[in-house]
Amino acid sequence: MERVRIGVVGCGAIAQVQHLPFLLDLAEEFQVVVVCDVSPALAEYAAQRFHVPKRVTDYRDVLSSDVDAVLLCHTDPKTEAAVAALNAGKHLFIEKPMCYSIEEADEIAAAARGSGLVAQVGYVKLYEPAYQAARVEVAAMDDVRFVQVNHLHPDNSLHVGQFRTRRFDDVPRHVVERAAQAREKAVRDAIGDAAPDVRRSFDIVSGSMIHDLYGLREMFGNPSRVVSTNTWAGGSAISTTLEYPQGHSCVATWVDLPDLWDFKETLEVYGSTKRVVVSYGTGFSRVVSTLTIHEVDAGGAAVRREPAMSWESPFRRELRHFHDCIVNGAAPLSPVSSARDDVSLIIDVVRAYADAGPITVQTL
């Protein structure tokens, strides 16, 4: 099997808990030759813990090495590094959120088209066996009437604390300031000079509720309209109603519950005789997501099914898919080009609250 030489940029919690362990596990597919973090101590720690021969603190040093591909999971925004990677001839895996503004999305997509390389977004929920099975069930429904998303989110530290992760306070001040300035510009380009609660909502939808939005897009296509968005608790709770061309609506809710251990994220699709429910685990867990189907059989009896799901982690599945795209020419399941619609929808969801009115969704 052809091995892909890969560099990982960003050695924070998601890299330590998910990406680096699975890259090592997939040793026949990948060889991690360099890790990069702006924290010198964290780069050294990650290199030692995950047996990586080289560590650097500047992503440009990764791009100048002989890697075939890069995995970007560093602090946002990632646009500069993503475009530079593609221009340097490296295949790209970029963790969500890909970016904040439409301009950034177009820049990354243009670089991907120009390079002819694989450019995949880390949309891990698409690789959940339960979600993929749910798509088949929903496709067989001819009368979807209502869709509901509930995302009740504890503080990540409650779950990250179950793993051995490290962080260090040694990032140079000028690096911190430069990253903050770049992030501020990207957010302003997306939503303008927004009020604090609007800004908080935008951060949440971009960083976490994005999982629910791209799952909806893959299952139903783009919505035609954001009917309304409401936020409360200083912008840390959001509920939005999306209207779809097929005639149904979706109510999607995300609520910050920082001190509550239990994580809950569900996608529920209702028809007149069938209900399909996906229950996800937190992105920092190793639990198997579940699928429950309620329906009425031909004899009129109520039936409940819970199909057994693969135990393979969706993080591992998406890395294997990335390898397949690079080595065998498979089409990316989550290409950067499709992520533009998600970036646009996030902005529309937040605008529907800020402007107190419905938004007609514009797509390419």
Image (cartoon, rainbow, N blue to C red):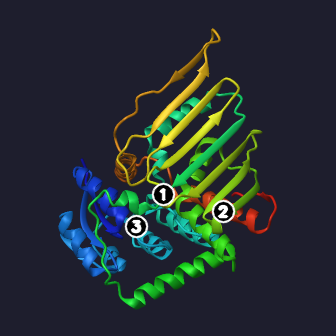
For the question of whether residue 362 can be seen, the reply is: no
Residue farthest toward the top in the current orientation of the protein: 299
**263 or 138: which is nearer to us?**
263
Residue 50 lies in what quarter of the image? bottom left
Amino acid residing under circle 3: Leu
> Is 35 located above or below residue 171 in the figure?
above
Q: Could you say which quadrant of the image residue 361 lies in?
A: bottom right
Which of marks 2 and 3 precedes in the sequence? 3
Please name the residue shown 44% across and 74% down the image: 81
Q: Secondary structure at mark 2?
A: helix
Q: Are marks 3 and 2 in contact (CB under 8 Å)?
A: no
Q: Residue 128 at x, y = what percent?
A: 44, 42
Return the residue found at the far right.
Answer: 357
Q: Vertically, is 316 above or below 114?
A: above
One can see residue 311 in this view = yes
Circle 1 is placed at which residue position?
154
Q: Which residue is mark 2?
A: 344
Which residue appears at 49% of the width and 61% of the height?
258
Quickly name the residue at label 3. 72
Q: Amino acid at mark 2?
A: Ser
Q: Are marks 1 and 2 in contact (CB under 8 Å)?
A: no
Q: Residue furthest bottom?
A: 174
Q: Quick one: SS at disc 3?
A: strand
Q: CA distance from mark 1 to mark 3?
A: 25 Å
Q: Residue 79 in the image: x percent, y percent?
A: 50, 73
Mark 2 or mark 1, which is nearer the start of the sequence? 1
Q: Is residue 257 above or below residue 114?
A: above
At label 1, the amino acid type is Pro
